[in-house]
Image (spheres, rainbow, N blue to C red):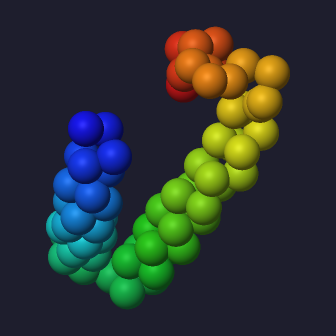
Amino acid sequence: MGYFFTFFITMGSFAPSCIFHAWYENNDASEDGQAFRVGSFVFLGNLAGIVSSNILLNKWEPQYIIPLNAT
């Protein structure tokens, strides 16, 4: 059942990202501010992947209780 719901998670994971990026892009009048926000949010989003790969270590598998509590 969990495998089935994984498809629903992946189908709905991109829509909030597009809405969020469109929202902050359209709420700043200056192009410099828009460019700064795009660069900052993309950097932070990519940084989350680096952090998660270093938090979820093999010694805590299969539940990963300690890393999930830390985040």
In the rendered image, residue 47, in percent from the top left (x then y), is placed at 65, 54
20 and 13: which is toward the camera:
13
Residue most extreme to the front = 1
Estimate the x, y position of residue 14 in percent, counting from the top left.
28, 67
Could you tell whether 3 is left or right of 11 in the image?
right
| Quadrant, the C terminus | top right
Q: Residue at x 48, y 62 (%)?
A: 41
Compared with 52, 68 (above or below) is above
Residue 32 is at least partly visible in this image = yes
Q: Position of residue 26 (x, y in %)?
A: 19, 76
Q: Against 19, is 69 above or below? A: above
**Horizontal side, residue 27 vs residue 38: left or right:** left
* Residue at image coords 72%, 45%: 53
Identity of the residue drawn at 44% across and 68% down: 37
Vertical side of 5 occupied by 44: above or below: below
Closest to the observer: 37 or 42? 42
Disc tally is 0
Which residue of the protein is positioned furthest toward the bottom in this rendering? 31
Judging depth in this view, the residue of 47 and 49 nearest the camera is 49
Please give left or right for residue 14 compared with residue 15 in the image. Answer: right
- The image quarter containing residue 63 is top right
Which of these two is toward me, 2 or 43?
A: 2
Q: Which residue is painted at 27% across and 58% down in the image?
A: 7
Q: Position of residue 6 (x, y in %)?
A: 31, 50
